[in-house]
Image (cartoon, rainbow, N blue to C red):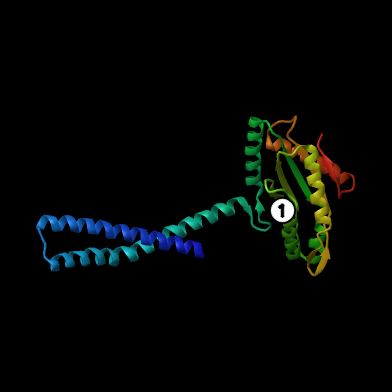
Amino acid sequence: MNIRSKRDVVKATLFVTSMSVLVSWAMSAVFILLIGATSAAGLLTALLASTLAPLAVALPLSHRNFRVMLELHLSRREIERLSRTDDLTQTYNRRHFMDMAQRELSLATRHGYVVSLLLIDMDDFKQVNDRLGHLAGDRALAACAATIRGSIRREDVVGRFGGDEFLVLAPYSDLNSAAMLAERIRRALASANLVVGGQVMGFKASIGVVCSQGHTGDADELLRMADQALYRAKELGGDRTELAA
């Protein structure tokens, strides 16, 4: 449990305990009035009893209960995070990315702005696994994902499509802007000089780009068009960006 979580438990425990003491004081005051106890000893005894009793009971019980509740809440949040995140690259997984893309496209259609989609394929990435092993390949993929994240805008979204392919969703980007983004990513990957398996290397990438302008607002359809553009980039030798018609 992190520091902030511990503070939340302490705050919740103190709040519940304080409320228990206040309620106990109020009940004691009513009881004293009803029985007419006015002596100093009687008032002091009632005050101590109404203070110590809830402290002795509420403090440990509320602390334990809130700790359990917070741990359950954090566990649920972690499960939700894992359900939408690719653990290797710390990008969104394909299913969650496509759900986000569809929601964004629906909003774009409703409010009249454009969205672009980039499909990125690492050229000849299989050679990394063959030469350096799959562990080095996993580290290389994670490094490539970090490079892509570092090349996009704050509002853009990155996902792992599968294998050595990534997706980028770029709201408010027309085809020209998306093409510039794709080239920025491609150059960043080529010049990253990532250390993998003790070797310094850059990575070439082929990128297919499509914009929602003039097309259907269906995420699967845009993905199909981006895939066709990516295929052309591969056919033309790779290490290039191609735009969907």
Taking the spot 76% from the left edge, 45% from the top edge, the residue there is: 119
Taking the spot 50% from the left edge, 65% from the top edge, the residue there is: 3
Taking the spot 72% from the left edge, 46% from the top edge, the residue there is: 168
- 148 to 177, vertically: above or below: below
How many marks do you count on the picture?
Answer: 1
Q: Mark 1 = which residue?
A: 149
Question: Around disc 1, counting alpha carbons within 10 Å, would you say few (fewer than 14), some (14 to 19), or many (20 or more)?
Answer: some
> As shown in the figure, which amino acid type bears the numbered disc 1?
Arg
Q: Position of residue 28 (x, y in %)?
A: 19, 59
The quarter of the displayed image where residue 113 is located? top right
Q: Position of residue 115 (x, y in %)?
A: 71, 37
Q: Position of residue 125 (x, y in %)?
A: 81, 56
Q: Position of residue 146 (x, y in %)?
A: 72, 57
- 6 to 174, vertically: above or below: below
The quarter of the displayed image where residue 244 is located? top right
Q: Secondary structure at mark 1?
A: helix
